[in-house]
Every structure is written in structure tokens, then in C-alpha cells.
Amino acid sequence: MRLTFDFFSNGGELGALMRAKDWSATPLGPPEHWPTLLKSTIRLILTSRHPMFLWWGGELVQFYNDAYRLTMGPERHPSALGQGGRECWEEIWPIIGPQIDMVMAGGGSTWHEDQLVPVTRHGKREDVWWTYGYSPIEDHGGVHGVLVVCNDVTAQHNAKAALERMNLALTEQIAQREQAQRLEAIQTGQRLRAEQALREQREAESTRLRSLFEQAHGFMCILRGPQHVFEFANSAYLRLVGERALIGKSVREALPDVVGQGFFELLDAVYASGQPYKAGDLRIELRVTPESAPSHAYIDFVYQPILENGRVSGIFVQGFDVTDRTMARQALQRSELRLKEGMKVARMVVWDWDLASKEVVFSDNAPELFGANWTDMRQVGAVLDPDDLRRMELAHREAVECNGSYGDVVRLRRPDNGQTVWLQVYATVVPDHAGHAHCIRGVSIDVSARKRAEESLREAGRHKDEFLAMLSHELRNPLAPIRSAAHLLAMAPDNASRVKMSSVIIERQVNHMTSLINDLLDVSRVNTGLVVLDKQLIDLHQVVLESVEQTQPLIAERGHVLSLDVPGEGEVAVYGDRKRLVQVLTNLLHNAAKYTPPGGRITLEISHHGDTVELHVRDNGIGLDAMLMPHIFDLFTQEKRSSDRSQGGLGLGLALVRSLVSLHGGHVTAASPGPGEGATFSVYLQKHAAPDGAGSAGRGPGQHEGEGLRLMLVDDNKDAANAMAMVLESAGHVVMVEHDPHRALDSVGRFGPDACLLDIGLPGMDGNELARRLRDNVQARAATLIAVTGYGNKYDKASAVQAGFDHYFVKPANTAELIGVLARIKPLASERQSPALAERVEG
């Protein structure tokens, strides 16, 4: 995302100098024309606390930050800002010039550690040691500048040199002492004085070095020998590790809480190789005592081997606690991540619009919401609804005039897929330092779902109002003939023929009103979940016979020809509620008869393919309009199928059909070539596949021939349990289904099963535990236990056998094998059941 705020903002003294400088007099020209790469690099320099320097362009125009200014003298600061590189650093150009040329030529980066680059500062020439790197600032157009990240390491260099000088002095003094020992016989006094002087000198050097280390900002310590014994640790180091007693202890003894974090292994490697090691932003966990809470820190450090006579005698540790810096960076990263995720979830895009250039910058998630990522507000206007655009432009002008805010809901057409997106837009004018409108910051929130919901509510309300008006009409219609018949009875109560005619009228109209009210009640019960299906194995042939019997009077009255293409008795069975399936088919046949002109043709066809049964009711009636097709099975819309209301009814039949079919796990569809071309309504149900020799399809639960077992089936998946129960009942067994293991334990004593089929993954108590409890139950311990589960590895099977299962099946179980296992199980003694219980289960 490209930022639109001032890249010179903040930045301390150098930020202020950059903002105040007249850049138009430099080769770069005014800042607003600078390339984005230069702006972002300058922003990086100004926001860093590390010394950083930049040479830009062929003239090597210079930029630097406050941290770098501290390394410069008045000879160059602030004149170096915006100055050419060669002109500024002429005295050291032979050193740095070739390095800069190499980077600008595309030769890559450079890195220099402890490099002597003498400079003139504060009126004198100084030997300054630097650790620095030159990095190219480049894009697809090539290298445009050189970024310098550096540290003035003169103090560290001098400290190291002082340490080396001290070691050299010690070596020389030891040699003098050895020479004095050879002359000890004749120069005892001189030797004693030399040794005393040497001790005093070493103590003085040590004291001076320790004082220097104590004053250092970073932490330091000296470790001796392969065990890394603490010889010295400054105050900063002691603060880092919690003011522990370190001197004379090895690192592993003094810092046991650091074991396993890799630091000791690094020390071992440096001591063995003699090569220094440095790292940055490394996390360390410290615990002063085993009982204390752990603390975390982030450190930059160097392990520098100490060489004596060409061999490593110890390690000098130096570094900085950078916890605050690291935590601040991590917090910023987390905050940015949360913001991005929140904007994505809220479907919100933020944007900045520069009023002068018309340039607009969107947040990263704009393509997901808009289907594109534009850079110019004129591009945005091209995809907005023209009416919404004019309204927004008016609000925009009014807000710019008073530096105010505005907001509206607009429609945007996505260029990628053409879909319309509704956006809630909020925008605020941001003035410049002079109070004039400079840019506009805003957010756009996708409210398409809300808009669609509002439209759906309005549409549903309209349909409901139309339905209520039609309901009022249909319920009032029978009242007129009833009232007329009542008047006839009052006028001539002794006229037998008139009384009979009035009675027929009243009965017919009351029946009609009863039918209307029953339709309303059926739809209400289904929609509120009050209808409970009485499922059993149903022969579809019988369903067809009952449905045709109920609709035959209307079909004959209207002179239709009804053709049937259905399976014979016992050929196709489904598991369902006979009464409700008859109601479904009756409604479809009745619907076809009503909306087919007299003398029409109606066809009922039933077919089955694989595990699906299809019922098709076709007519050559008035057909369906394409606009009605998506809503044909909805409430409050069926009356639109025809403007002819002469047939009466509330148009709830198809809504009821869909609901009842759904309760059976099926679905219903409607098709029509168009108005006047007839229609086809199709119902799809699950076919029941009875095993070989299972008996007729019409056998229901509890109807067995005496050879079956009493089976308890426990599975929390209701569909899986019911389907398995159907198979087992078709094989002649009596099945009790439970979905909760605790209810199964309560029921087992009353039911007395011969075998129990248990799922392993049950809620509240797994199948293994249920099996163990059944084995401990007096009424169930002799029953055969069969696991039917989705878990299939060796461990699961072994656990099931250990829990007491006799057989183990993995879902989907092989039905033939399962029935074969059941066939080998002998029923338990029937006397364990009371006659009343057996009668209740069987009947």
C-alpha cells in the first residue's frame, strides 16, 4: 500500500532540516516529484534510530538521519544534507569512491567490519574505525542510490587494541621476569622490585580496563577457559541476568536456566574454532531461581575469542539489550495484522484520495471487495451507478467547501465479474497547514448482504400481504352461499326440497372451508416442526392406489385422461410415512387436475435407478411462467401460477409437498416449457434395498416370523441408526434404537437384547465404556456386543476387544457379513422377558 502522508514528517532535527530545505535548487528538484523509491527510503532513514546515510542519483545527493549526525562534525553538518558525495567526502573518496561506484554499477552490496576510515571532525583529523555496509537502492529500472548502515566502532576497536596491548605488555613483562629469574642469584633485589612494579602495572591496567567496561552502555563479560568461567562482568551484564553471583563460576553453573537455548553451544564453537560469532534480535529466557517466573529479553551480541600466544584462552562477550526495540516492532506487526484481518472480516476498505492529483490509494484488500485496485478516483467513478455518483459528487463538493465529512450508500459494478456491490461510504476532508482541503480519507464497507436482506424482507412482506388478501377472499367466498342457504331455510322451513338443497349447499361450502383450514394447519405444523413421521417400509404401489382413489373424482369431473406407469406390487419400497406420502402424491395429482383445462392428459410415472426412486406427475395444462419457477414451492407465492382463481384453494399444496418430501430426506422439482405447455413435478426419494431373503418390502418394524434376534442399536447419528435399523428389521430382527449411551443403559434391562450394536464415538460416554458397563449389567452381560464404528486402526480394534466387544465392524459395515454374524447368534432364554414386555415390543 502506498502511503500518502509526508515522508519528511517527524525524523527529529534532520526531518526538520529536510522539510525546511529548498530542494528545487538541487538536482532532485521539488520533493513532490521525487520517485516513490526515494521517498520510502528517506522515510526509512528518518524513522530509524540506527545511523543511516543515503547517496542518490548520479550526483550522489546526500541524506542522513539524526543518529548519523552524531558521527559528523560541524565541518559537514548540516551542509552535507543535499550536497554531492564526492564534494562532501573528498578527503576519503579514494577509500569509499570505488565501493560506491561498484554498488551503483550493480555489483551488489558491500560489508566492512572494523574498517579504518579517517575523517576530519571538530577541526582535527581523527582515525575512526567503522563497521558499515553499502546496499543498492534499486527497482526494475536499475540502481538509483546507495544506502549506508554504519556504526562508529572506534571505542570497541580501541578497547580491543588496548586489550591486545595489555596482552603484549604482559608477554613482554613475563619475558623480563624469566630473565630476572636467571639472574636471581645476583639480582634478587632488582627482581623483587620488577615483580612488584609488574603487579602494580597489571592491577592498574586491569582497573582501568574494568572502569572502561563498567562505563560502557552495552553488557560485557570475560569468560576464561573451555568451561567459560566468569572472570569479569560489568553492571549491564549483571542487570541482564538478574544480579547473580557470577565471578569464578562457569556459565553452565551460573546460568542453568539458559541450558537448551543454544548459547552455551555457540560459546563452545567459538572457543574451539577461534572464529567470532555475532547475532541480533536473539531471544533469551531467564529464570533467576527455579521458583521464579521466567523473563524474556532480546539481545544483540558478539562472542569475540581472546587469543594468547596464538591460542584461544577465553571469550570476550559484548552486546546490547534490545528488548524494547524488538517488542515495539512485534507489537506494531501484530497491530497491523489485526487491522488487516479485522478489515477483511468487516469487508471494509480504507482509502486516501489526493484532491490535487486525483490519485487514490486503497488498502490491500480492495481487489477482494471491488474486483480491482484503482489508482485514480476517475476510474472509480466509471464503475459507480450514475445516479449514486452524482449524489456523491454533490456531497463531496459540499464537504470540501467546509472541510467536513460526508457519507452515503452507493452501488459499484465489479469489473471482474459484473456483480453489483452495495457500499456504505464514509469520508472526511483533511486540510493542509493552511486550512485548505488537501485530501480525503475514507472507508467503504460492503453492505450488499444487508441490502439483499432488506429487499428480501420487502418482497416477503409484499407476498404475505397478497396472500392475506387472497386468504380473506377465499374464506369469505363460502359465507355467501351459506348465508343464502340459511335465508332459504328461514323463508320456507317446511319445503322439503328447498331444505335438502340448502343442506347440500351448506355442507359443500363447510367442507370447502374445512379443506382450506386443514391446508393452513398442515403447513403450520410442518414449518414449526410439529409433524412427526411414522416411518415404516412402504410399498409405493399401495401409495399410488390410495392417491389415485382420492383424486379420481376430480379427474373424472374435469374429463381428464390419467395414465399410470408404475411398478407392480412389492417391487419398489421406501422407508417413510404412508399417510404423508399419499398426501404428497395426492396434492400433485390434484394440482395437475385443477390447472389442466377439461379433457386434458395427466401421467403418473414411477421409476427407480440405483438407490433413488423418482415420481413424475406430468400434465398438458396451463404450464408455468419462467418468473414463477424459482418460487413455485414457496409460501405466499403459489397463487400467482394462474390468475384464474375459479378452482379455489390457498395455493399451499406445493409448499406442503416440498416440506413433507424434505422430512423424508428427498427433494422435489418443477419444470415447464412455458405458459400453455404443461408442467412436470418430480419427487426424488431414497429407495429401500432389502437384503436377499429379507421378506416382502411391506414388512414393518416388529413384524418378524420368530427367528429374529432382539437387537439394541446405539448410535448418535440418527440417519445412520435409522438406516441400519431398517436393514436389520428387514432381516426379521426386532430393533430398539437409542442415540444416547445413558438412555441405552436405562433401557437395556427392560428390553433384554440378544445382541447390542454400538458406535464407539458416542457423546458423553464412548462405546468402549458403554460396553464395559453392559458387561457389568446383570440383564445384558450375556448379550453379544458388536462394534460398528468409523475408527478402523489396530489400536482402536484392540481397545474394543479389551472393552468386551465380540465383533468389530468398520463403517460402512458390510451388510451381508453383519447379517451373517447375527445369523450365528442364538437368542437368549425368552423367560428373562415378561409376556407383557414381549407383547409391547412385538406389537
Image (cartoon, rainbow, N blue to C red):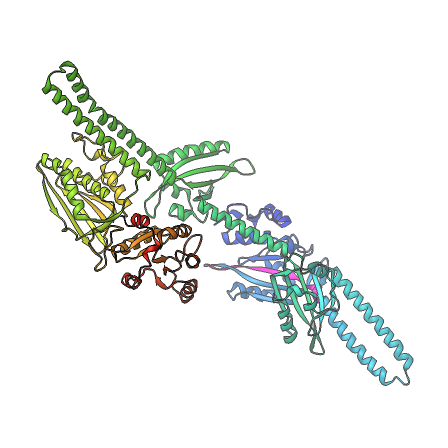
The quadrant in which residue 787 appears is bottom left
Horizontal side, residue 370 vs residue 340: left or right: left
Horizontal side, residue 125 vs residue 339: left or right: right
Query: Visible in this render: residue 359?
Result: no
Q: Residue 834 in the image: state x and y as whole percent.
A: 33, 51
Q: From this view, report whether residue 834 is shown above or below residue 820.
A: above
Region rendered in magenta: 139-158
Q: Main secondary structure of the magenta part?
A: strand
Query: Visible in this render: residue 321?
Result: yes
Q: Residue 192 in the image: state x and y as whole percent.
A: 89, 78
- Residue displayed at 61% across by 57% down: 52
- Residue displayed at 23% across by 59% down: 691
How many labels were placed on the picture? 0
Is residue 153 shown in magenta? yes
The quadrant in which residue 299 appears is bottom right
- Residue displayed at 45% across by 31% down: 398
Horizontal side, residue 158 vs residue 108: left or right: right
Please name whichever residue, 558 or 349, is drawn nearer the observer in this view of the structure.
558
Q: Residue 142 in the image: state x and y as whole percent.
A: 48, 60
Is residue 556 shown in magenta? no
Please name whichever residue, 692 or 311, is drawn nearer the observer in this view of the structure.
692
Please name whichever residue, 403 or 666, is drawn nearer the observer in this view of the structure.
666
Q: Residue 601 in the image: state x and y as whole percent.
A: 10, 41
Please name whichever residue, 833 or 560, is drawn nearer the observer in this view of the structure.
833
Q: From this view, report whether residue 9 is shown above or below residue 791.
A: above
Q: From this view, report whether residue 758 is shown above or below residue 600.
A: below
Q: From this view, report whether residue 221 is shown above or below residue 525.
A: below
